[in-house]
Image (cartoon, rainbow, N blue to C red):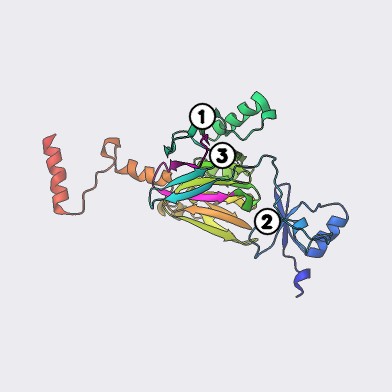
Amino acid sequence: MNMSAAKQWYLDINNDIKGPYTATQIKKALKEGKLTEKTMAFKKGNQRWDPILHIPELRLTQAKISSPKPTYHFDQLAHDIDFDIQGDESQFVEIELDPNESVVAEAGSMMHMEAGIEMETIFGDGSETEKSGVIGTLLGAGKRLLTGESLFMTVFTNRAHNKRRVAFASPYPGKIIPMNLAEFNGHMICQKDAFLCAAKGISVGIEFQKKIGVGLFGMEGFIMQKLEGDGLAFVHAGGTIVNRTLAAGELLKVDTGCIVALESSVDYDIKYVGNIKSSLFGGEGFFYATLTGPGNVWLQSMPLSRLAARIYKAAPQLGGVKKGEGSLLGTLGDIGDFIDR
C-alpha cells in the first residue's frame, strides 16, 4: 500500500482527536478552509504532536520552516531553569536559578535554599499577566481550591547577582518526574496532588472530566490538575514511575489509582470489570481505567491511597490487626502485651 494514501494521520480539533485521515484528505480540507496549518497532527512513530505547518507531507506551503516550534494556547513564556534530581526512594529536586529567575512551588515543599533567594507567598500560581488584575488572581486561586490544594503558592526568586539554588522535597516516598511541557504541546493532565514545583510562568489549573463515568468512578473525580506552559514542571508520585508511549488507537487498561499524568491527546475512560466474582473477591475493585493513544502516560506502582489503606488496616488503635514477624516470639510478644494491660 502506498503510505501517502494510508489513513495514518490524527488531528487535534478543539481538543477532540479525529481520524485517521490520509495526507490527501488533510490537504483537501486545508484548501477548503476546514483546517488551518496551525492544526496539530500526529501519526504512529512520531515523538509528539506538531502543527501541520511543520509537517512537509501535509502542509500546502512549500517554504522551509527555519526553526519549527509547537503552537501553544497561551502568551507568557516560562523561566528557563536548570535542575538536578537527587535521592532514590525519597527524592528532592534542586533547582539552579539565574539572577531574577523564579520557580513556583506548593506551600511547604521547600527543603533548603541559598542566600539571595527571596521567598514570597502568592494567590494562585503566579502565571497570570498583569492585565488580569485582581479578578484574574482570584480565579487562579479558585482553580487550585477546586483541586483540593491550598489557595496559596510560594514563589522563590533569585535576587543575587550570581546563580543560587533552592531545593524541594517529595511529600512521601516515590519519584519526581521532570516534564518539559514544550515537548507535549504545552499541556499535561495530572492527578490532583501530583504537582510539586515548576518554572515561573507555568499555569496550574483544573481539568474537568467530560465523561460522567470517569468523574463518578475514576477515584480522581471530575476535576484533575492541568499544567500549561512552555517550561519545566515537576510532578511527584509514589513507588516506581513508568512512562508508556501509546500509539494511535493503542489501548491500555490501568488501575484507576495508578495514573499519574497523561497527555491531552490520550482518551481517558472508566470501564466496569464485568465479573461480579472478580470484583468482590479479586481485590481490584469494580472499575478500571482505559487509556487510548496516541500520547504519553505515566503510571505509579504505589498510589498514596493504597499505601494509606494498608497502614490504616494494620494500625491496632484504629481497629486494625497487629501482625507479628511470623515467628513464635512474635506471638508470645503479643500475649505479653495483653497481660500487661
Q: Specify the principal SS of the magenta part.
A: strand
Farthest residue in the front direction?
161
Q: Residue shown at 82%/62% (left/top)?
A: 25
Of the residues shown, which amino acid type is indicated by label 1? Glu
Name the residue tied to disc 2.
Answer: 49
Binning the other alpha carbons within 10 Å of mark 1 as few (below 14), some (14 to 19) or many (20 upward) gives few
Mark 3 surroundings: few (<14), some (14-19) or many (≥20) residues within 10 A: many
Q: Nearer the viewer, mark 1 or mark 3?
A: 3
Does residue 64 sit above or below 276 in this rendering? below
Q: Label 1 belongs to which residue? A: 120
N-terminal label among 1 and 3: 3
Residue 252, position in %: x, y? Answer: 55, 58
Q: Which residue is mark 3?
A: 101
Question: Which residue of the protein is positioned furthest toward the right in this rendering?
Answer: 32
Which of 56/236 is in front? Answer: 56
Residue 10 is situated, as x and y percent measured from the top left of the image, at: 72, 58
Q: Nearer the viewer, residue 148 or 49?
A: 49
> Taking 327 as reference, is 254 left or right?
right
Marks 2 and 1 in Cβ contact (< 8 Å): no
Q: Secondary structure under badge 3? A: loop
In-image side of 49 versus 105 (left or right)? right
Query: Is residue 206 inside the magenta stretch?
Result: no
Range drawn in magenta:
156-180
- Mark 2: secondary structure: loop
- Disc 1 secondary structure class: strand
* For marks 2 and 1 on the same chain, the one whose residue lies earlier in the sequence: 2
Q: Nearer the viewer, residue 16 or 239?
A: 239
Measure the C-alpha gap from mark 2 to mark 3.
29 Å
